[in-house]
Image (cartoon, rainbow, N blue to C red):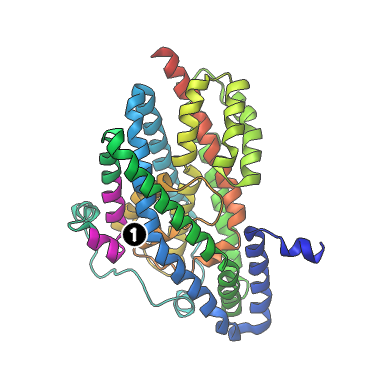
Amino acid sequence: MSPKKFLRLGLGSWILVAMLAGIVAGSLLGERASVLQPLGVLFIHLIKMLVIPLVAFSIVTGAASIGNTGKAGKIGIGTFAYYLATTAVAVSLGLAFGLIFEPGVGVDSDSIRALFSNEYADKGSVPGFWETIYGFIPQNPFAALSGGNILQVLFFCLFFGFGLSALPAAKKEPLVALLSSGTDILLWMIMKVMLLAPLGVFGLMADAVGTFGWEILGRLGLLFAIYVCALLIQTFGLYSLFIKLFSDFSPWRFIRTISKVQMVAASTSSSMATLPVNMKVCEEELGLSPATTSFVLPLGATINMDGNAIYYALAAVFFAQLFGIELSFAQMVAILFTATLGSIGQAGVPGPSLMVVAVLLAAGLPVTGLPLLFGVDRLFDMLRTAVNVTGDASCAVIMDRFSKEA
């Protein structure tokens, strides 16, 4: 590769290069690599600065869009119900795989604490079921925003977004446009912060390898293998089952036909970029009506992120185990709720999933080790996007049958 081509590498490639460079630096410097840790800490602080407003804007605009599905009657309600149900199953699957296979267990927790952070979940008083439910509802939404209470921010913004969708168009559209502009501004800011991601990944990876050697990398490899297994079950198990039960297609025909869409999704790591291909394949090769695909697939590319949902839940369990935190019932409910709603609010664009930060914060888990995942995030992103678009297409197949019967 020529020097000019090397300098034109995309951000994902630079992050991968930074991860490899961090591994080399950590191996050479050993414990002295801790001097590079501030690079990762700076990056994490910048990410935390943006995640609360990004969640607020994206959830409100997403909920406002979802609220319009009522106009589509039975198909709109069915589409939203399908996406919500499969996302909830995906989060549960991620939680279950993390708890069963324990990818974060095996690293000395005392060393982990010394390496990353002294901030841990408060386990002195574990709230019960109703206390957890009460904790979803903010008594003061502005206090929830300023205090960084992700669960309460999600609840209020979701409620606010549905209320916004109920307004007449003349009143609703200016506010929706303003919120969309706010989201665009935050995305611009995040893209600028992400330019520092290679430095952050380099600093934390060097520090991690210098402290633990290859032990931490083995944990990441196990996490990836577990994630792949969960995605396979979601794709070939859940979607195929729903296709079999609620459509006239055979699961085998569906999976075989949609495989070309999956390849495009994996190569672009973007549900939005894959949307035209998905619509073309669904209409021309699966024979779905354009009316169904033009409604179900764009909505799915915006709010249906089952692969992301599995990732959020699994990453949360991974970091809890890595830091030696035993998840309480309240924390698992927080992960389930935040990962489900967070994946709905996640835009269908490529890049490291910052919503993981929201899930970790909601469950009271440390976020400072997150850059460890950024180096391999491109591999995670390729696979989860392929699952996301498969879920969109499966919903279109099922809703097309119901639209013909309606």
What is the x, y in percent for residue 3?
79, 66
Question: Eyeballing the image, is 18 above or below 246?
Answer: below
- Tell me, yes or no, if residue 232 can be seen here: no
Q: Give the range drawn in magenta.
A: 142-158
What is the x, y in percent for residue 41?
48, 75
Farthest-out residue, right:
2
At label 1, the amino acid type is Ala
What is the x, y in percent for residue 71?
33, 26
Q: Which residue is drawn at 49% across and 63% down?
A: 104
What predominant SS class does the magenta segment belong to? helix
- Residue 327 horizontal side relative to residue 140, left or right: right
Q: Is residue 157 magenta?
A: yes
Farthest-out residue, bottom:
32
SS at mark 1 in the image: helix
Q: Residue at x 56, y 84 (%)?
A: 35
Q: Nearer the viewer, residue 108 or 275?
A: 275
What is the x, y in percent for residue 123?
29, 68
- Tell me, yes or no, if residue 302 can be seen here: yes
**Where does label 1 land, which residue?**
362
Q: Report the quarter where the N terminus lies.
A: bottom right
